[in-house]
Structures are given as structure tokens and as C-alpha cells.
Image: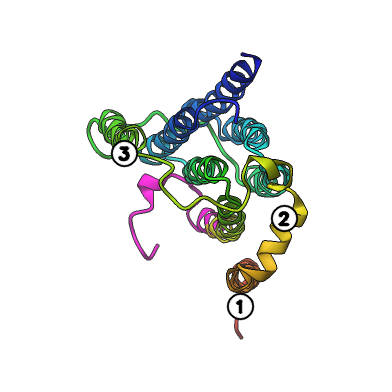
Amino acid sequence: MAGQLLFYLLALMTVGGAVAVVALPNPLYCVLSLVLTFLGLAGLYLSLNAQFVAVVQVIVYAGAIMMLFLFVVMLIDLRAEERGALRLPFQKLAGTIIALGVFAGLINLFVSTPLRTGAKGLFPPGRLAEIGTVQAVGKVLVTQYVLPFQAMGVLLFVGIVGAVVLAQRRTRQG
Amino acid sequence: MLAPLEHYLILSAVLFTLGVVGVVVRRNAIVVFLCIELMLNGANLAFIAHGSALDSLDGQLVVFFVMAVAAAEAAIGLAIVVLIYRNRESTDVDEMNLLKL
């Protein structure tokens, strides 16, 4: 019973932060609400035996990516979004209806089709203590998933080079 | 797992849907990026929930890669947003309707 209550508290924190991201007019408040969402998600990952991913979520997502967003928000002089006319008529209503369609599709998929039909992995309840640890993730990462791992390295390198190239100021010729 | 798998998946669907609403409705480019990150996190939660239900580590590995991709994408995307702001003095996505200023 306490377990379910904890789940609902974490879920409330996560969804509350997500609603605030979409609803608040000031972008700085939106960034901070998303940090709250990420912390709620980290708690949920802990409840799902994903300790390494939970810590990486806090360090990388809430710590690094959100700090990047905060830097950009501080660099750009932002006013709260102007209340001018939206480009399409009924944009908010149409957006909400489309999103409800997406939601209905997802719920249909999750609730009606039989789940858990995939092949069971290597961590039956007897080995539950090992599943999310750094050792387990690291071992699989360099043996079974080594090609995606190297591809991630290349991708991050491309990201760094791209960011440096984009940030350079053009010097005037002549 | 604190709750049945379906509860986690419904939460994941809610997060994804809120991200979709944000991308369509909000006009500030930075908030659109935040909602894209929200969608990615909804998918991450679905991956980890399924991985935990199937006693497998594969869900967590996929989330690891998704996070790396999201970090690279956020860095480049925000650099582009800053450059566009320098040129046009605005982050309103409704005003970015020309390829060349």
C-alpha cells in the first residue's frame, strides 16, 4: 500500500511539472518545472530497479541539459509570450484535440494488446539486486552494445564540433 | 515495481501527450525544445518500465543511448536558437517562416 502511494506521489510530481511546462508563460519557470519533472522521473526509475539510469538522469538531464537551457534563457532577453493572435485559428483547441487523439492511440496500445510477450531477459526475480547496477550496465555496454556505444561517441563528437562551429563569429573580410 | 506495468505506461502516455500539446501550442522556441525533451522522457519511462517487467537490461541500455542523443540534440538545437535570436531579435516560432532573413 505504501508502494502504490509512493508511485502516485512521484507520478503527481512528474505530471505536475509537465503541466507547468506547457502552461506557464514565463520560459524560466518552464525550465525549472521540467527539472522537477526530471527529478520525479528519477524517483520512478529507482522504483523500477534502474539505479544507474536514475543517477544519469539527474546528472545529465536535470544537471547538464537543463543548465544549458538556463544559460540560453539567461542569454536571450525573453518577455513572457505575447498574447497576440495565433497564426492558425483555434490553434490551441486543434492542438489539444490532436494530442487527445495521440493519447487515445497510446492507451489503446498499452491496455488492449497483450504485454510482456517479449523474450524474458536474464534477470529473473532471484537476481533482482543486480539488474540496474553500474557493473551490469557497463558489462553489457562494452560487450553486447559496443557498436551503438561507439556510435554514441561519434555522435557526441559531431555535436561538439557542430556547437563550436555554430558559435564562431564570422570575421568580416577585407 | 511499485505499481502494475499499465500504470507506468499510462504515465508515459500522459507525459508524451503533454509534450505534443506543448510543441503545437507554445510559440517560444525554447519552450518547444523543453516539450520535445518531455516527449523523450515519456518514451524513456516506457522503455524502463517494459525492461523491468521483462526482467531485462535492454530497456535501460536504450534509455542510456536516448539520453546521449538528447544531450547532443539539445546542444546543437540551442546553439541554433541563439543564432536565430541574434539575427531576428525574436524566438517566436510563428515569425520564423522564411528560410532567409
Callout 1 amino acid: Arg
B33 vs A108, left or right, is right
Look at mark 2 in the image and give the residue it sits on.
A136
Mark 3 or mark 1: name the one nearer the start of the chain: 3
Look at mark 1 in the image and give the residue it sits on.
A172
The residue lying at 29 percent from left, 37 percent from top is A105
Q: Over which residues does the magenta segment extend?
A: B81-101
Callout 3 amino acid: Thr
Q: CA distance from mark 3 to mark 1?
A: 61 Å
Determine whether label 3 and label 1 are within 8 Å by CB: no
Identify the chain of the residue marked 3, using the numbered disc in the image. A
Residue A62 seen in the figure: no
Q: Is residue A123 above or below residue B1?
A: below
Dividing the picture into quadrants, the one containing residue B24 is top left
Look at mark 3 in the image and give the residue it sits on.
A113
Q: Dividing the image into 4 quarters, which one contains the N terminus of chain B?
A: top right
Q: CA distance from mark 2 to mark 3?
A: 31 Å
Identify the chain of the residue marked 1, using the numbered disc in the image. A
The residue lying at 71 percent from left, 42 percent from top is A51
Q: Position of residue A84 (x, y in %)?
A: 36, 31
As helix, strand or loop, the secondary structure at mark 3 comes to loop
Q: Is residue A153 above or below residue A119?
A: below
In front of the other: A47 or A85: A47
As helix, strand or loop, the secondary structure at mark 2 comes to helix
Mark 1 or mark 2: name the one nearer the start of the chain: 2
As helix, strand or loop, the secondary structure at mark 1 comes to loop
Dividing the picture into quadrants, the one containing residue A95 is top left
- In the rendering, which numbered label is found on residue A45? none
